[in-house]
Image (cartoon, rainbow, N blue to C red):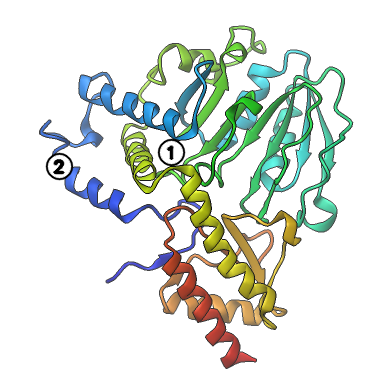
């Protein structure tokens, strides 16, 4: 069977070139006589894999020397607790709630102190990003938290919030490495890799060194201290070795493609193809206010649940898979991450046009 066009929001499509390398090296990684899956994380061979992955990531993103890059486990959901445990010195944090994941982070932080919701777009089903230029930042807030690209709702911050001098913490899971970023604007920026970077099981955390201390909330488990992982170069315990290796291959692929500036241009081109069609279609419509549209996640609907279901079913039969929207919003969603080729987006739009002709 030939490969389908996979529009999944995560775990998501990976570059074919990377998958081929994985296949070639599966039984014998570079003459070691073993698979990376079987390798000790304490071995010299693996040490060079994880160090090279970090070096390539730092180069791609432009991570300054005073930031640590950590390869952790537990997904964004573990970060929802780890961040307050490590950063909530005053037991106060401010949250801008623009979707389900920011909301979950806000709810989790309430276990550790006062979590203030200082802005939200829930009033319009998270279809926009609120004005973040002059927010009521709490005087004693330890940090301000955002989810920068909302996978479920397809919105994205075009400007970072004015945190009035407070530390900015951002979850960038679904836009990681899709465009350049200025790490110095954040205290912590992190993401689960399963959308744009690699197979599920790794969370990359980029954290400013002055935020890595032993001064954490009482009762914080050893494994949930950033210092534990920073002090041992992400090798305190057995990391998800194979997944980090695949991420490393993706970093090399991104460098070969020309880096994040080039990826941004490619992603803008792909997004324009689908948004232009949605704006002209009489049957399909986007659900996000145009100025806040994500480049990565494109939710859309018809005006009937029956038609949505019919579209998803026929699309799948035609080789366009995982287009069903998140259960909380319904409809459809096309996630067009770095590894989704432009041809895939063009083919989807042609299929949508044909479906519209046949069903209008």
Look at 81% across and 39% down and name the residue there.
Answer: 132
The CA distance from mark 1 to mark 2 is 21 Å
Up the image or down, 242 lies above or below 336; here it is above
Q: Secondary structure at mark 1?
A: loop
Look at 27% across and 71% down and name the residue there.
Answer: 1
Dot label at residue 230: none
| Residue farthest to the top, as pictured | 214
Up the image or down, 150 lies above or below 325; here it is above
Look at 49% across and 52% down and name the residue there.
Answer: 10
Which percent across, then down, holds residue 118?
A: 85, 35
Dot label at residue 27: 2
Look at 26% across and 24% down and name the residue there.
Answer: 48
Screen quadrant of the C terminus: bottom right
Q: Is residue 331 visible?
A: no
Side of 151 where 11 appears, left or right: left
Choose the circle earlier in sequence order: 1 or 2.
2
Provide the residue designation for mark 1.
Answer: 201
Q: Is residue 115 visible?
A: yes
Up the image or down, 294 lies above or below 219; here it is below
Which percent across, then down, holds residue 81?
A: 64, 27
92 or 184: nearer the viewer? 184
């Amino acid at each position: 069977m030939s490969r389908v066009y996979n529009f999944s929001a995560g775990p998501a499509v990976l570059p074919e070139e990377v998958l081929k390398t994985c296949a070639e090296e599966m039984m014998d990684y570079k003459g070691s006589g073993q698979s990376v899956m079987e390798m000790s994380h304490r071995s010299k061979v693996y040490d060079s894999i994880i160090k090279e992955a970090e070096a390539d990531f730092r180069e791609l993103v432009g991570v300054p020397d005073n930031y640590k890059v950590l390869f952790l486990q537990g997904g964004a959901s573990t970060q929802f607790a780890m961040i307050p445990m490590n950063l909530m010195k005053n037991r106060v944090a401010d949250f801008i709630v623009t979707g389900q994941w920011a909301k979950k982070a806000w709810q989790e932080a309430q276990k550790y102190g006062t979590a203030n919701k200082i802005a939200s777009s829930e009033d319009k089903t998270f279809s926009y990003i609120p004005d973040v230029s002059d927010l009521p930042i709490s005087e004693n807030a330890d940090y301000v938290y955002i989810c920068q690209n909302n996978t479920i709702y397809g919105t994205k911050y075009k400007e970072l919030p004015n945190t009035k001098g407070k530390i900015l913490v951002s979850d960038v899971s679904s836009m990681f490495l899709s465009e350049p970023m200025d790490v110095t604007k954040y205290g912590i920026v992190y993401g689960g890799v399963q959308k744009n970077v690699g197979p599920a099981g790794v969370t990359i955390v980029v954290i400013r060194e002055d935020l890595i201390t032993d001064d954490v909330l009482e009762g914080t488990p050893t494994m949930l201290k950033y210092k534990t992982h920073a002090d041992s170069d992400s090798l305190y315990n057995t990391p998800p070795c194979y997944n980090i290796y695949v991420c490393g291959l993706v970093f090399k692929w991104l460098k070969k493609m020309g880096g994040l500036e080039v990826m941004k241009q490619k992603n803008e081109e792909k997004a324009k193809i689908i948004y232009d069609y949605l704006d002209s279609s009489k049957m399909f419509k986007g659900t996000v206010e145009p100025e806040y549209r994500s480049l990565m996640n494109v939710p859309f609907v018809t005006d009937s649940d029956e038609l949505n279901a019919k579209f998803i079913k026929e699309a799948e039969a035609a080789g366009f898979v995982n287009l069903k929207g998140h259960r909380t919003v319904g409809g459809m969603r096309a996630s067009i991450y770095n590894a989704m080729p432009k041809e895939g987006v063009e083919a989807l739009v042609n299929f949508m046009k044909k479906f519209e002709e046949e069903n209008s």
